[in-house]
Amino acid sequence: MTDEATEVHTTRIPDSSGIPANSTPTALIAQPLLEKAIESGNVDVIEKLVAMAERERADQRRQLFNAALGKFQSKRPAVIKRRKVEKSGGTLLYKHANTDDITRAIALTEQANGFSHRFDFEPQEKGGCNATCIITHVAGHEERTTVTIPATSGQNTNAAQNRGIEIQYGMKYALCAAYGISLGDEDTDGNVPIEPITAEQVIELGDAIRFSGSDMSKVLEFGGNAPSLEQFPATHFKEAMKICNVKADRRATE
């Protein structure tokens, strides 16, 4: 049995608070037009100007979110695997870190950069669940990252306990995917091979690394110390692309 998660995806959610309504360039330019539209009672113009200003405020919040995420990822502490899984005779099989370990490790850095997180879960008909980590920034922007956990069971466990195991795995992997946290080697029983990214993804990730000015060695370390991009684990691809894209956005604005 492993705690390998699959099908990671991120959804960006527009927000509606956190930046003053008259603080954006578009809002300042549109203010005279808005006042005239209000005086004349032109509802259509009013709605268009308000929607335009709100879109720009949402974009500002997204940029603040991305900048803060970049700072978080550059300073996040290492998550140490302290929990042991042993055979009945005491032979160590592997070490791992659970959600509590990860949360404690990132707590101060998370708060310092204005982030908070929470979870949501959706059970699957044939077992397993979709676990979503929702990251919210103080500026008002939030993003949802979802991982799909397959049906999982422990030794001598009932259905309720198995659902609890799936939720725990879901929180762990969704949190790591949302923040781009690497735990190094995958926490498995050693029987499941790690699937590498495709040839097309090798090119895509390589271009993203160069464009963002990222350190290749750091990216490979993030991929569980992969010896090369050709052996970079598929489970870390989207997270690595997300980190590179954030750095590229920040680099473009400097």
Image: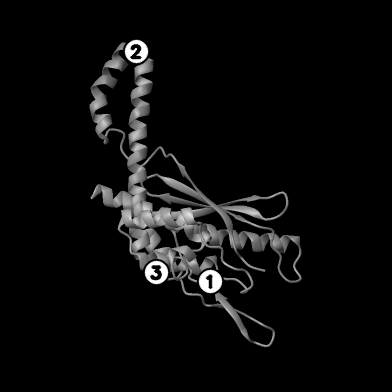
Q: Which residue is mark 3?
A: 77
Rate crowding at label 3 as few (under 14), some (14 to 19) or many (20 or more) other CA atoms within 10 Å.
some
Viewer-nearest of discs 3 and 2: 3
Q: Are marks 3 and 1 in contact (CB under 8 Å)?
A: no
Going by the numbered disc 2, the residue's amino acid type is Gly
Dot placed on the residue nearer the N-terminal end, 3 or 2: 2
Q: Which mark is residue 192?
A: none
Dot placed on the residue nearer the N-terminal end, 2 or 1: 2
Q: Specify the quadrant that holds the N terminus.
A: bottom right
Place of residue 12 in the rendered image (x, y in percent of width and height, measured from the top left): 46, 44
Q: Secondary structure at mark 1?
A: loop
Q: Secondary structure at mark 2?
A: loop
Viewer-nearest of discs 2 and 1: 1
Q: Nearer the viewer, residue 31 or 66?
A: 66
Dot placed on the residue nearer the N-terminal end, 3 or 1: 3
Quarter-of-image position of residue 168: bottom right
Q: Which mark is residue 41?
A: 2
Q: Secondary structure at mark 3?
A: loop
Going by the numbered disc 1, the residue's amino acid type is Ala
Which residue appears farthest toward the front when viewing the image? 199
Place of residue 72 in the rendered image (x, y in percent of width and height, measured from the top left): 36, 60
Q: Which residue is mark 1?
A: 97
Quarter-of-image position of residue 206: bottom left
